[in-house]
Every structure is written in C-alpha cells, then in structure tokens.
C-alpha cells in the first residue's frame, strides 16, 4: 500500500506539472510581459535581470532534477553546492534590485513630470 | 485498582482505514486534475501579478516547488521499501528559502508602487506652458506624458488644422502671424496628441487666441 501511495503521489505531481507546462506553452496561463519590467510611469521595458533569473532558475532546477534521478537509489535527497546557492542568491538579488530601482527609485527625467 | 488496558484495533480495521483514506486522497487528486483539464479550475492567472503582467518571482517559486517535490517523492518511491529520507539537506532548505523570500520581497516591491497593483489602461496626458496667446504672439510648448505604453512618441495635430497656427513634431505651437491687412484670428484651437503606438490613445488641450 505504501508503494501505491508514493507512486500515486508522484504520478499526481507529474500530471499537475504536465497540465501547467501545457498551459504555459499553449497560452492558457498568462505569460504576458514575463521578461518585462514596469517603470514608475507604468511603461513596460525589456528587463535583462529577469532573463538572467530565468536562465539561472532553469539551470539550477534542471541540474537538480537530473541529480535526483541519477541518485534516486541512494535514499537521500541530493544536496546543492554552496557555490550554486551563492550564484542563485546573487541572481535573485539582481532581479529584486532591478525591480525595486525601476518601480520605486528611478527618477523621471526633468520636464517629463 | 486496575488500569485500563490499551485497546489495539484489529488489523483489518487499520488496513480498511488506510484504504479508505487512500481512496479519498486518490479521488481528490483525480478531481483536481479533472477540473484543471476541463478548465473549471482556472490556471490562467497562476503566475500573474494584480496588474495583469506575468511574474518572474511566482514563476521561479512554481518551478522550484515542483522540482523539489518531484525529487523528494522520486527518492521515496525508489527506496526498497519506500522510505522518507533521513534528513532534508541544508542546501535544499536554503534554496527554498531564497526562492520564497525572493517571492515575498518581490510582492513587497510590487505593492509599494501604484503601477504594480492596478491594471491602469494606457493614457496620454498633455501638459502645456500656457493656454492663451495672440496672433503673432508667443509660442506655447506642449509636452505629452505617455503612460503604460512601450513607445513614448506622439503625433501632434491641431483642430482646425489651418489658419489657426501650427504645431511641430516636438509639440511647439506657433500662433498665426498678425497681419495688418487681415482681421486678427481669435477663438479656440484644440491641440491633440495621439500615441504612435496605439492611435486610440490620445489627449487634447485647448488654446484660446485672444
């Protein structure tokens, strides 16, 4: 019964992930302006800090999943190296810093106020 | 006085309870998947902000939650017999901490700015240095503030388009020249700024020629 529960849960997570992925790819889930930020004046701008966060997220998530598949028989979750965590933390700090700057602190040029 | 003895339920009752709980959870899981599949559970705003834009912080939290949950259950299922890991590695906890706190800080920034919470529609607003002049008199500089569009450029126009002055591409209005032979033009002139990106978005201002 335990095996049935565990595999059933895994199947449920897989099916849920498949639903979300399908809807992300077919436009069922809104992805408008995912890589765009907003200025103080509400203008959308292409945001490199969001692109780098997307790349770091994809890299860390994929490498962790592959590690988990590879080491599944060990019975323990694989750890994440501190260098990877530091890089991911930096990536998030860059994203949040960019967002805070554009939404809260960026000065409107004189004459456009 | 005799102490009450602990009552152990019969094994068939334990097994039956387990199967009932399992059946209920399986039914719940299938119902959720069915409702998502038939769009009765709407996922369209799963990673959206209140202003309608998709959110990178929600997206990364979603990805990491799925990856860690799937990895955990994969590890449990692969054991023989299936067993929970002895410990959750510190790195995984830190990763989840970074992901969740980034989401929370992002929400804080989002809700600290009016642009982050309201789905304000695009608009053009005209600002001018004055609203009255005379034929042959001073020019008036207009500026257009564009909100919610990628392109700040606007097209300037006048109504009526002739005999009541001109406006250049920078929003500088020049009144008509004063001529001793002709009567001095007076009346109202409407200045219009239309967004080049979305021509349905515009604003007007009025100049009075006295």
Image: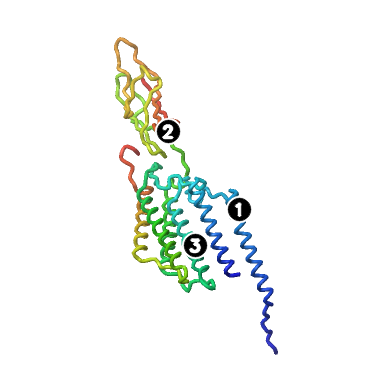
Quadrant of the rendering where the N terminus of chain B is positioned: bottom right
Question: Which quarter of the image is occupied by the C terminus of chain B?
Answer: top left
At horizontal 47% and vertical 43% (from top left) the residue drawn is B119
Vertical placement of residue B182 versus B32, above or below: above
Disc 3 target residue: B70
Q: Are marks 3 and 1 on the same chain?
A: yes
Q: Within 10 angstroms of label 1, few (less than 14), some, or many (20 or more) residues?
A: few
Toward the right, the furthest residue is B1
Q: Are marks 3 and 2 in contact (CB under 8 Å)?
A: no
Left or right, residue B139 beside residue B84: left
Residue furthest bottom in the image: B1
Q: Nearer the viewer, mark 3 or mark 2?
A: 3
User: Mark 3 and mark 1: span between their CA atoms?
Assistant: 20 Å
Chain letter belonging to callout 1: B
Q: CA distance from mark 1 to mark 2?
A: 41 Å
* Disc 2: which residue: B198
Quarter of the image for residue A8 reads bottom right
Q: Disc 3 sits on a residue from what chain? A: B
Q: Which mark is residue B34?
A: 1
Chain that bears disc 2: B
Mark 1 or mark 2: whose residue is earlier in sequence: 1
Image spot of residue B14 (x, y percent):
66, 73
SS of the residue under disc 3: helix
């Amino acid at each position: 019964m335990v095996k049935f529960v565990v595999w059933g849960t895994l199947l449920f997570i897989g099916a849920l992930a498949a639903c979300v992925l399908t809807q992300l790819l077919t436009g069922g889930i809104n992805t408008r302006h995912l890589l765009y930020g907003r200025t103080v004046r509400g203008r959308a701008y292409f945001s490199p800090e969001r692109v780098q966060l997307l790349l770091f997220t994809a890299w860390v998530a994929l490498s962790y999943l592959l590690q988990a598949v590879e080491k599944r028989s060990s019975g323990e979750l694989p750890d994440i190296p501190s260098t990877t965590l530091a890089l991911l933390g930096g990536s998030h700090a860059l994203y949040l810093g960019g967002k805070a700057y554009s939404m809260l602190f960026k000065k409107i040029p004189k004459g456009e106020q | 006085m005799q102490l009450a003895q602990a009552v152990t339920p019969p094994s068939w009752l334990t097994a039956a309870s387990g199967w009932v709980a399992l059946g209920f959870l399986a039914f719940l899981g299938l119902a959720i998947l069915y409702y998502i599949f038939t769009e009765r559970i709407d996922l369209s705003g799963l990673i959206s902000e209140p202003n309608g834009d998709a959110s990178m912080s929600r997206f990364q939290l979603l990805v990491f939650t799925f990856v860690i949950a799937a990895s955990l259950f994969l590890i449990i299922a692969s054991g023989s017999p299936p067993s929970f890991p002895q410990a959750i590695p510190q790195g995984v906890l830190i990763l989840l901490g970074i992901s969740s706190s980034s989401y929370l800080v992002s929400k804080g920034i989002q809700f600290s700015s009016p642009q982050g919470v309201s789905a304000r529609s695009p608009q053009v607003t005209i600002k001018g240095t004055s609203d009255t002049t005379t034929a042959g008199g001073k020019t008036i500089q207009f500026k257009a503030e564009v909100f919610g569009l990628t392109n700040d450029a606007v097209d300037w126009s006048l109504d009526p388009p002739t005999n009541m002055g001109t406006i250049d591409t920078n929003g500088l209005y020049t009144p008509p020249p004063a001529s001793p032979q002709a009567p001095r033009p007076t009346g109202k002139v409407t200045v219009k700024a239309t967004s080049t990106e979305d021509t349905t978005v515009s604003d007007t201002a009025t100049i009075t020629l006295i």
